Amino acid sequence: MFKKIFCIVFFAAFFSEAKDIKPFVYGSLEPIYSLSPFSATGLTEWKVHQLIFDFLLIEKPGSRDEFLPGLAKNWSVSKNKKVYTFELREATWADGKPITSKDVQFSYEHLFDLAYKSPWRDSFIGIEKFKILSPRKFEFSVKSPQFELWKNISVSLRILPQHFYNNSNISVYNKSIMGSGPYKLLKFESGDKVTLVKNNNWWGYRDSTLADWFSLEQIEFLHIPSETTVAAYFEKNQIDAFPINNSGFVKNFLAFSPKRLHLIIDDQNKSSNWVQQIFFNLKIPLFKNKQFRLALNKLIDRDLLCSKIGLKKPPQAQFSVEEGQKILKELGWKDKNTDGVLENLTGSLKFEVNYNSATEELILSTLAESMKKYGINIELKFIEANHFWALLRDKKFQAYLDRQDQNQIVLSSVWKSNGAYNNTSFANKNIDLKIQSLETAFNGKDRSVINKNLHALIDGEVPSLILCEDEHKDFVIHARQHLKDQMRGKPFWAWFKQND
């Protein structure tokens, strides 16, 4: 009888304590409708997956191309850089079953199984063969040396439990998820909320390097219906963190007292200012000619544009109305009807720009208005985030607004002629060769030098319309969260202590 009463009291106390835990709330403009690794493509879904799933290696936060052991305790790259060998540590899934090489094999092979319709297939298309060497040792062979592919295998390939994900009817996984990472699913309210709780089976809690990386007992991803309501969620203490997408957010949050909110960059390698750019679909005849793209850049008075919206002019931008108009006239554009609109045989000079954030409307509308005096009509089209990226992937756009860190590593998947994520159809043989040298460089210093030269070559091809320097921050954090030192080598989730 005493034993029965003790159990009742113990479990009542346990559940009462668990109920009182206040989760750390991460606000998101993206509703999460699926948890499935086979269909989820949003940035918030990726954040969830990074906490649920493990990866073979861990890219050290605050560094570039430095790696720590993950699920793989050891790894090696062959001399010809075409064979990558990994050895798994002894670890288990959230349900306690052991992780083996067969799970890694399934995690890779399902990408190419048409039944799963994986959206991540292109990131791994250069793999030639997977070979199991032992229950916890295996190797990937690739067609040609590619650092980016090696990195995708090491830090982007979600390692999935084969026994859980062996149903090719992928819709069953929209509401369920299992991994071996630091967290597991506690509750899922489709489109509104995802709550994660610590996975005490995670091997990292017993690792001296990683033990304090994930101290939060619960993390909640909460959908916020619109950009205009984010501030209200902070005011009401309903969220603790929110990802900043553009300078509009930075400006809005600077209006708050610094004592109430922190604006931070989570990676010390990033520039504090990114450059806003309109990228062209280079398959469209209008944008194929480099001189035409150069002319558009010459016509933008960035001193006026950027100061008008409170941003800075990028140092690489050049302004000359005379040169811009001269180039257009040499290309056959004329004001035939003397109505101020330049035309050629195909019609007036106009194009459409897609964007996916309401806070970007000011810079775009200001640009569009200023370009009218040259007879250039820019039509603006707001696209919801997931659809926006789908249009880019399918190259069904004329131009789109995005930002770029000029120090960022040039990705072959984005800039190589046949790159998997080359949305703009950019192609240049000399740049392809330079990218190839970057791809075969596995040394960090060598990669840095090549990368700097590549940025200069790409800028010289004028693949985009340069606008303004966008003040860059990654997150806004509620001041009630006492930030620890943002030390290199610690991820975002390690900066906070659990709310009482």
Image (tube, rainbow, N blue to C red):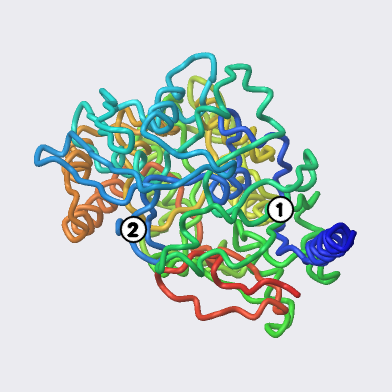
Residue 483 drawn at (x, y percent): 60, 78
| Residue 372 in the figure: left or right of residue 421 | right
Q: Which residue is mark 1?
A: 221
| x 56%, y 51%: residue | 51
Between marks 2 and 1 in the image, the one whose residue lies nearer the viewer: 2
Q: Who's the residue at 36% across and 48% down the image?
A: 89
| Tags 2 and 1 touching, CB below 8 Å | no
The residue that appears at 46% across and 58% down in the rendered structure is 204
> Which secondary structure lies at badge 1?
strand
Looking at the image, which is closer to me, 205 or 53? 205
The earlier-in-sequence mark between 2 and 1 is 2
- Indicate left or right for 408 with 167 as reference: left
Q: Is residue 107 above or below residue 181?
A: above
Q: Quadrant of residue 476?
A: bottom right
Residue 469 shown left or right of residue 460 in the figure: right
Q: Residues within 10 Å of mark 1 (few under 14, many from 20)?
A: many
Q: Nearer the viewer, residue 326 or 3?
A: 3
> Image check: 124 left or right of 42?
left
Relative height, residue 163 to residue 366 (above, below): above
Q: Give the label on residue 157, or none.
A: none
Kind of residue at disc 1 = Phe
Q: Which residue is mark 2?
A: 68
| 111 or 471: nearer the viewer | 111
- Residue 125 location, x and y as percent? 34, 26
